[in-house]
Image (cartoon, helix red, strand yellow):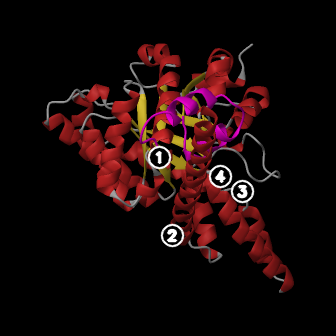
Amino acid sequence: MTTPTEALAAAGVSIWLDDLSRERLDSGGLQKLIDEKNVVGVTTNPSIFQAALAQGNAYDAQVAELAAEPGMDAEKAVFAITTRDVAEACDVFADIAASTAGVDGRVSIEVDPRKARDTAGTIAEAKELYQAVDKDNVYIKIPATQEGLEAITETLAAGISVNVTLIFSLERYREVINAFMVGLEQARAAGQDLSKIQSVASFFVSRVDTEVDQQLDALIESANQADDQVQADQAEALKGRAGVANARLAYQIFQELFSTERWALLAAAGALPQRPLWASTGVKDPALPDTLYVTELVAPNTVNTMPEKTLDATYDHAEITGDTIEGTYAESDAVLDGLAELGISYQDVVAQLEAEGLDKFEKSWEELLSGVRSALEDAAQKGQ
C-alpha cells in the first residue's frame, strides 16, 4: 500500500524535516526518516540548534576540543558546531542530491539572525557558512527582510544556493522572486552555471493563523457582548483559514512570475525555478486538524518542511487527494477580503509577524550562545 508520505511525494511535494541534531545524525535516525517517510531534505534555524545543544551529551566531545583551542569563544564555537552538523547531514543526503540534480537532498543553515537588517554582514556570513560547510547541497538561509533582499541577490550571484526564510506577505514574496531572478541574471552575466544555483522561498503558514485567529476571537467576544450574531458568525467562519489562503495565493504568484518571458530566458540558460516552501507547518491550535498545513497545500514544485510531530501525523493518517491549491484562488482572496471587512489589517499582521519572527530567532540565538558559553567554561575547568 502507498503511504501518505509516498502519495505526497508523488503529488510533487518534497518532504523536508524541520529539525537537526548531532544525536539524530549519530543514531541513524535521520537516515531512517529518509528510508521510511520519504524525507528528502532538512531545514534548521537558531531555535532548532538551541534545542539540540540543550539536550543530551552528543556535543560534549566537540565542545571539549573547542574549549582547548586558544582564543575560542561562544560565537566561534556555535559556528563550528552548527556547520559540522550541517556538513554531516549534507553527506547523508548526498545520494538524493545527486539523483535529483540538486533539487532535493538539501540541508539549510541560517545566517546569524542578528544580521537580518545588515545587508553587508549577511552577505559576508553567507559566504563564510558556504565555505565552512563546503558541500554542494547546502542552502544558506537568509531572512526576507527589506535589507535581506539585496543580500539574497548578491549571494545567488556569487553562485551560492539560498533558502529565503521568514516570508509572510504576498508583496514581500514578489520582491523575493525578483531578488532571485536578479541574482541569476547577474550570475549568468558572470558566466556562472545557473543549473548549480538553486533556491527555495520559505513562506510561513501557521503563525498567520495564530495571530489572525487571536484577533478573530477578540472580535467574536466583542460581537457577542454587543449581541451582534452576524459579525460573530462572520468571524467564526474565518478562523483557521488565513494561513492556508495566504499560502495558496503565494502559489498563484509563483505560477504567474515563473511563466513570464523574463523567467523563460533564465530557464533557457539552465536555471531552475525557486520553489515555494511551506514553513511553520506544525498546527498550533488543537481545534484544527494536525495535518492541515500539509493536506491543504499540495501542489507540484513545492516543499513542505515539517517538524517531526507533523511528519509522523502525515505518515500516519493524512489524506492526500492530489493538488489542493490550484482552483482555490478566488476562495482564498475571499478569506483575506473577509478579514479586511472585519477590520483586520493584512499589512499590520504580516509586518508584526516578521518582527516577531526575527525577535524569536534572535532570542534563540542568544540562548544558544549562552548555553555554548557555559559549556565551554565547564569543559575548560574539567580540562585543567
Quadrant in the picture for residue 62: top right
**Badge 2 or badge 3: first in the primary sequence:** 3
Amino acid tagged 2: Gln
- Image side of residue 44 versus residue 120, left or right: right
Find the magenta span and give its range: 43-72
Amino acid tagged 4: Ser
**Badge 1 or badge 4: first in the primary sequence:** 1
Give how far apart the Cα atoms at labels 1 and 4 are: 31 Å
Q: Nearer the viewer, mark 1 or mark 2?
A: 1
**Badge 4 or badge 3: first in the primary sequence:** 4
Which residue is the site of mark 4? 206
**Could you tell me which secondary element the residue under label 4 belongs to?**
helix
Vertical side of 113 occupied by 220: above or below: below
Q: Which mark is residue 240?
A: 3
Give how far apart the Cα atoms at labels 4 and 3 are: 9 Å
Question: Which residue is found at the position 54% from the left and 36% from the top?
Answer: 43
* Residue 305: image location, x then y, percent: 59, 37
Q: Which mark is residue 347?
A: 2
In front of the other: 199 or 326 = 199
Amino acid tagged 3: Gly
Question: Which residue is found at the position 57% from the left and 73% from the top?
Answer: 345
* Residue 229: image location, x then y, percent: 83, 77
Which residue is the site of mark 1? 75
